[in-house]
Amino acid sequence: MSFQTYPTWFSSGGGRITLDKSNVHESNPPEFEAFDVLRPRGPPDEETQAATLSVLSVDMRVTENKKDHNTDKYVNSNLIVRRNKEFTIVIKFNRALKEQEDNVQLEFLIGSSPDENKGTYIILPMGKEKPGVHWKSRVVETQGDYVTVGITPDAKCIIGRFRIFVVVVSDLGKQRTERNPDTDFYVLFNPWDPKDYVYMDKDEDRQEYVMNDVGVIFNGEFDNITSRSWNFGQFEEGVLDACILVLDSGKVPLVFRGNPTELVRQASALLNAQDDDGVMVGNWSGDYSEGTAPTAWTGSPEILLKYAKEGSAPVCFVQCWVFAGVMNTFMRCLGIPGRVITNFCSAHDNTGNLKTDIVLDEDGKVDRSRTKDSVWNYHCWNEVYIKRPDLPEQFSGWQVVDCTPQETSDGLYRCGPTSVSAVKEGELSYPFDAKFVFAELNSDVIYHQSTKQGKMKIIYVDTAYVGKLILTKKQGSSDYEDITSNYKYSEGSIKEREIMQNAEHSGLAPRDYMPIAEAGVDIELQADTIKMGDNFKLTMIIKNQTSQTCTVNATITGCVVFYTGVTSSTFMLENKTATVEASKTKYLTVDINAAEYTPHLVEQAKLLFVMYGSIEETNASITTMKVVTLLPPELTIKMSGSPRVGKDLTVTVEFLNPYNFMLEKVQLRLDGPGLIPIKIKNYSQILPGGSVKYKVLIVPRSPGKKVLMACLDCPLLRQVTNQLEIEVKD
C-alpha cells in the first residue's frame, strides 16, 4: 500500500485542504488529495526507514461486521454499519505495533470539504480517547504484524458514505494511506441502540418496520378495502447509493443528516418534483403518455434506480401510494423505522378552515365550478418512528410524513414530521404541519346549495364522513391493522368534542356553522361489490326516526370520479319519492347500467353517487354520498416446480380480456425481491375475449418467504394486480 506524506506540524483544523471541486460528488468523491505536502530536508537513512512503522493493508471485515450490524441483506460490496455500535477492522503493518511508542491515527471523512468542527472530518488516535470527539476506537488484539481495531461511530453522527485513512506519525512526518474506494463504509441510523433517536425497543417492530422489504398498501373504499403488494427493496443493489444521491442532489447540508427529524422533513420535499426537481412527478390528469402510469409501478427500486441512472432527472409519473412506497424505502434503507398509512375519506382542505365545502346546484347536482375542496377516497402517507427532542416527551414515537405535494410548508411542497399523538390530542401548535394533518382526518363535509342568483345556503353538515378508517400493514401478516384510534377519539364522544375545542384554541377556525337543525331522517346509499362492466343496483335506505310520517323527495346524481374525489363526467340523474311511516325504514333501488357509465370511466374505475333530499313536512334537507369502486378483471399467477435457492422455477401469468372493446398499449410487469429483477412485457393489443400468457423462468437468490408481484396496465384498464407468496427453501 502506498502513502501520502505531510509534516507533523500540520493542523487539520486550520490546515489547507486543496480540492478540485469541478467534479465533486458528496457520496462518491474524487481521489482525495487533501493535504499540502512538505518533504523533509534530506532523505532518511536506511536504518530509520526500516524502523519506521508503515501500513501494508486494511481489512474492513465486511462480512463479519455486516452480520453484527444487521446490514448483511444490503447488496453492496462495501461495509455498512450502524451508529453507536462497534465494528472492527484489521490493519497489517510492516512490523509489530509498539503501542507505547508508535503514533497511529484513524481519519474518517465525508463530503467534499471535510471539517472537524462540522463532524465531517474525524481524527482518532488509535486506541485512545480524544477530547471533544464522540467517535471511539480501541485496540482489540495484536497478533504479530496484524492489529484488530474496534471503531464506534457517534450515536448522533452524520449518516452516509465515509472514507477511512490510516495515518502513521513519525520523525519522517505523517504517512497517510492512499484513497481506496474499497475501504469506504456507510454509517446508518441504528434502531437497535437506545441512544439513537430512531430506537425501537421490540425486535418484532424492527423486523417489520426496518428489515421487511416487501409490504402491502391498502386502497379502495372504507367499506370495500382492496390492497396491492409493494416491493420496498431497500437492500437491492444501488438503492442505498440512490437514497444518498437524493440528499446530495437536493443539496441537504451534511450537518442535517445526523438528525432524523430534519432529514425526514427534507426528504418529504425532495421526493416530489413539485418545486425542486425532486425524485418523482405527481400526475392526476389521466394522461401518462410522457412516462409510466402511476398504477403500473410495482415497487420503489425501479424508480430510485431510474432517478440515479438518468442523472437525477425526476421520474414520471406517480400518485400518493407510490410517493408513500418510495418514501418508505428511503427511510428503511437509511435505518429509520417507517410504515405506509392509508386514510380513507381523506379531506384535502384547500382553504385550511377544517371545512370541506361541496356545492350543489338547485337540482342537487355537484357544482364542479364552485366546489374547490375534495375528499380523497383514500390517501396514503408515511409514519416514521423517531424521538422528537424538540417536542414534549409524549409526542415522540410515530410521526406523519407526507411527500405527496398538496400544500406548501415553509415555502416547499412537503408535510411533516407531525406527531401522531399531538394530532390526536388537538395540540396543533407544535411543528410541523399539524393543522393540515388534523384537517385531513377531522374536516366536516358541508353541503351548500346555490341558487341561480349565486346565493348559497348550508343545507347539511356531515361531521363523520372524513377520516373514517386509518390502516397500515399488520406485523408479520399481509392483513391490515386498524390504527384509527391512534389518530382520533371515537366519533361523537365527549373526548372528541374536547379535542375539537382544543384544536380551535390552537388556531383552527371555529365551527360557527354548527349546529344545523336535525332532519330526523337518515339516508344511506349501499351497493354490492361490482366488477367493472357489470350492471348493478344502488340501494337507498331511508330511516324515519321521527314520530310522524315523512315524505322524502330525493335527487340522485351519478358521476365518474378520480380517487382524489375530483369528479369527471355525470352519467345519470334520477328523482325518487318515498313516504316513510314513523320509526320505520324503507328501501328504494336504482338500476345502474354499465352502458351508461363505461364510456366515461377514468383510472381506478370509481363512481360517485350524491343524494340530495328534502322532507316535505318540515322542509328540512339531507345529503349523503357514496363511492363505488368497480373491480378490475382477474390476473392469475401460477407456479410450477419446487422453489429452492439456485434452482429453476417456472411462473406463468395469464389474463383474459372480458370486455367488448380492445385493450391497446398493454404493459405487464413482474417484480419480486430475492426472486427476479423487474421484467416488463409489452403487448400492442389484446382483442375482445382475447387472452395473453407470459411464462418466465426465475431462479430464487435467497431463502425465506418471497412475494412475486404482477401488474397489468393500459390506458383503458388500470390497477390490475395480483401477487403470489413463495416459500423458498435452502
Image (cartoon, rainbow, N blue to C red):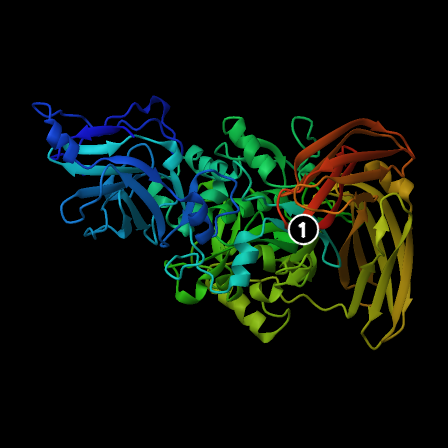
SS type, badge 1: loop
Judging depth in this view, the residue of 701 and 692 nearest the camera is 701
Q: Please give the name of the residue rendered at 66% of the width and 45% of the height, measured from the top-left corner.
A: 645
Q: Amino acid at mark 1?
A: Lys
Q: Please give the name of the residue rendered at 13% of the width and 45% of the height, measured from the top-left corner.
A: 101
Q: Please give the name of the residue rendered at 32% of the width and 30% of the height, measured from the top-left corner.
A: 179
Q: Looking at the image, which residue sits at the far bottom? A: 547
Q: Please give the name of the residue rendered at 32% of the width and 36% of the height, measured from the top-left corner.
A: 57
In the shown orientation, is residue 153 left or right of residue 587?
left
User: Quick one: label 1, few (<14), some, or many (20+) residues within 10 Å?
Assistant: some
Quarter of the figure with the N terminus = top left
Q: Looking at the image, which residue sits at the far left? A: 41
Looking at the picture, how far across and down is residue 170, in whole percent?
14, 37
In the shown orientation, is residue 576 left or right of residue 221?
right
Q: Is residue 722 above or below residue 474?
A: above
Q: Which residue is mark 1?
A: 729
Q: Is residue 688 above or below residue 501?
A: above
In the shown orientation, is residue 393 left or right of residue 220?
left
Residue 576 lies in what quarter of the image?
bottom right
Looking at the picture, how far across and down is residue 655, in whole percent?
84, 38
